Image (cartoon, rainbow, N blue to C red):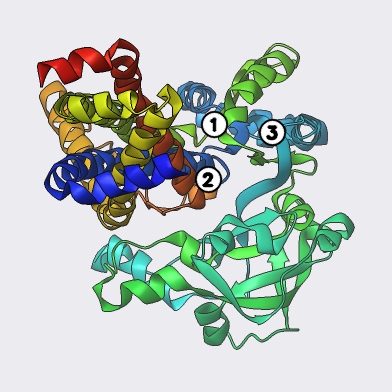
Amino acid sequence: MRSVKRGLRSFIRHPLASLAVILLLFVCLTLSLSMLAVRMAADSQVEEVKGSVGNYAELRVSSQYQMEVFQQQRQQDPAKRQAEARKMSEEEVLAERAQLMVPEELVDDFSRQPEVVSYDKVLETRVTLPEIESAELASTLSLRGGPSSGALSPSEGNSFFFEGNTDGASASDFLRGAKVLAEGSFYTYQDYLQANPVVLVEKTLAEENGLEVGDTITAEITGAQGRDSEMELTVKGIYETVEAEQEGETRDPMAFNPAGSKFYAPLSVVQILNGTPGYVELGCYYLDSADSSAALQHKFQDMVINGTEGGERYELATDYSDFEAISEPLHKVARTSLIGLVGALAACAMIIVLAMAIIVGGRARELGVLKAMGATHRQVLLQFAAEITCVCLVAALLAMGMSAVISQRLGDWLLREDALATSEQEAQSGQGMPVMGFMARNLYKEGGRFSLSGSDKPEVKLEVVYRGGLLAYGILILLGISLLGTAVPVVWINRLRPARVLAME
């Protein structure tokens, strides 16, 4: 205990030397803790992103196969195609309509992979509603056609896009907030299983046609004739299009978005209306983590492409590129901060070793007197250990406070520098050129094929939160530096000869 008290008195008795060491350690420790906080924040944020981005996949017909079918149809004579269509059986007609679709059974089978947390099935098509008219649709089409376009045909003025899935609340437009339910309720999974003829209608369209929740709409069934050619749909809910309200008066009237007046209905109902029972446009899967994306691609290759007849026509599209766009800058910041952390800790080590060498070397007589008076190695070492601990503790406390202030600024600066470097590299290599909208094929999660192509990179933000674990790391750094600082007194004490030191004086 006396040795510890002597160490505390030595710390107070030499304020200038202690202050110089504290300031140097304060700068290096502040940089160390700030770099550590940035690295921990970057790693933590990457793990959080894995649960929301990069964990989506959808099974659909590939763009290449669609182009092949399109080219084949273009090469065929229209009259010959019509003649062949009249001779087709019901099975052949269904196969013709479903050649660009995915069997529902295949979507269900693939959903049984352990990486899949939940999934949905989607079908988008056009349906004729003889009794419904859209003023926006009519005005837009007439504007596009010009004064000489004449009157719109019934098929143009009464044809609307329908989207079917297994649960209305899980439709992508509602999940991402582009549309919100204003009245009524969503159709449910039970409505899908029972093929209940219910539908969600856009608010403006409902007002134009005097529709309310509970009213019925007549829809024509594709390919059907006679009494079975129509279906009565009950309005179960009315929704608002949030995107259209945000655009307001700045919206271009020529840029008509057919999704604005889209109808939503249970998948089984839309399949009947489209005349394609048992087929969907795509199956969308939500995974447990972005780390499962690669494993799911391998299983898709084995199960679908290699294990299914005609499996080469399908593809598994994911949003893993979005995850990479977000995580790569964070990974770079984490690597840079790790380099800064190692450098700052090395500077701390050099400072404490050199400082203690100077301090102990300048107090050789004091050490000789203590040894001559019978002080043991342990007692002398405790004295200097107490002094070193006081210096490091004061520096660490100041550094923790300062790092809490500058950590976020340091993280933003590192992220901004990385963004600038990436932009310069893309400019030099000619990358990052805008992709033509007609070439892009959006994921259903992004709004489907009728949404605007997302060419912008996801915005990356780094949120540095001063966590409790950082305090533990600070304590470990403090102990490590203190122990390192005691190594110098240990060497001096072992080499010191009291008689020789006193004789020199």
The answer for how far apart the CA atoms under marks 3 and 2 are is: 32 Å
> Which residue matches tag 1?
317
Of mark 1 and mark 3, the one earlier in the sequence is: 3
Residue assigned mark 2: 48
Q: Residue 365: where, in percent of width, then height?
A: 19, 26
Hey, what amino acid is under mark 1?
A: Ala
- Please provide percent x and percent y for residue 309: 74, 15
Q: Which callout, 3 or 2, points at the residue further toward the start of the chain?
A: 2
Front one among 218 and 442: 442
Q: Is residue 434 visible?
A: yes
Report if residue 455 is visible in the image.
no
Left or right position of 83 against 79:
right
Q: Tell me whether circle 2 and circle 1 mark residues in contact (CB < 8 Å).
A: no
Residue beneath the point at 80% across and 32% down: 112
Residue 416: give its label.
Answer: none
Q: Nearer the viewer, mark 3 or mark 2?
A: 2
- Looking at the rendered structure, the secondary structure element under dot 3 is strand
Q: Residues within 10 Å of mark 2 (few under 14, many from 20)?
A: few
**Residue 323: x, y in percent?**
45, 37
The number of numbered badges drawn on the structure is 3
Q: Between 30 and 340, which is closer to the camera in this rendering?
A: 30
User: Which residue is painted at 54% across and 39% down in the image?
Assistant: 50
- Of badges 2 and 1, nearer the viewer stands 2
Q: Quadrant of residue 146?
A: bottom left
> Which residue is denoted by mark 3 in the rendering?
102
Q: Nearer the viewer, residue 31 or 125?
A: 31
Under circle 2, the secondary element is helix
Q: State the CA–CA distance, disc 1 to disc 3.
A: 14 Å
Identity, as a three-letter code, of the amino acid under mark 2: Glu
How far separated are the C-alphas under marks 2 and 1? 22 Å
Instruction: Give left or right: position of 321 versus 11.
Output: right
